Amino acid sequence: MTPIVLAGGKSSRLGRSKPLQIIAGKSLIQWVIDRLANFSTEIIIATAQGEAIPCSSHVMVKTVGDIYPGKGPLGGIHSGLVASSSSQAVVVGCDTPFLSVGLLQYMTETSPGLDIVVPRIKDKVEPLCAVYSRNCVAPIEDLLKLDELQIIELFRMVKVGYVEEQEIDDFDPEHLSFFNINSQADLERARKLAAERRWLLDGN
């Protein structure tokens, strides 16, 4: 199981590099890497141009560029899966500092026989906190070549399993795994959460 971190966004709403923003003394990308190091000896960071983002880990961190440039998160998922040495991957965004390790582990345990395992809260799915198999590579390529960039379109082409809200609540009752940083207000909220809830510093 190889984790893939999507870090190819332009951070246009925040106005500066999202992965390098600091929360409780460490960068956003470092928060994510620290969570994912539980899963593998290899972590892949998918960026637009393959530029390295400063971070450290006791596991190998490999940066890859987009094979199909300018195709958004779907293009990043594709590039990460192609570069992965594993049959499955945990895929997350670089701006989700409060990932629940327990929830991610649960999703990996329910993934055998499925191409995607994705959290679902009511009618909303969380495709950037999900497990994807390498079986998704060919159908993603088909979508990218058609310039169809909606990840939900992939769900119609492969075998998908859903982790429902009650299951999510067992590990992450506040659903902080899906809290991502898009604006200065989000960044300030994340800093406040980290200061008030010290348990977030160690993962959950």
Image (spheres, rainbow, N blue to C red):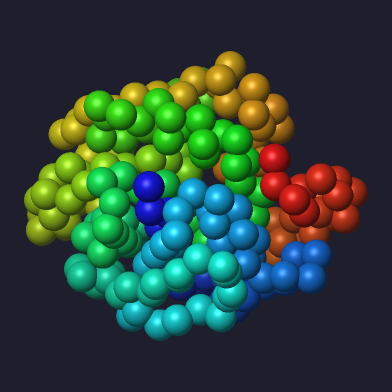
Is 128 positioned to the left or the right of 187 in the image?
Answer: left
Query: Residue at 30% across / 74% down in the picture?
Result: 65
Query: Residue at 33% across / 73% down in the picture?
Result: 64
Q: Quadrant of the C terminus?
A: top right
Image: 162 above or below 45: above
Q: Nearer the viewer, residue 138 or 88?
A: 88
Is 52 positioned to the left or the right of 191 in the image?
Answer: left
Query: Residue at 51% across / 79% down in the picture?
Result: 53
Q: Is residue 125 visible?
A: no
Quarter residue 21 falls in: bottom right
Q: In the rendering, at what x and y percent does residue 160 appear? A: 29, 28
Query: Number of callouts in the render?
Result: 0
Quarter residue 151 falls in: top left
Image: 92 above or below 126: below
Q: In the rendering, at what x and y percent does residue 18 appear? A: 58, 70
Q: Nearer the viewer, residue 134 or 41?
A: 41
Q: Nearer the viewer, residue 52 or 2?
A: 2
Q: Is residue 82 visible?
A: yes
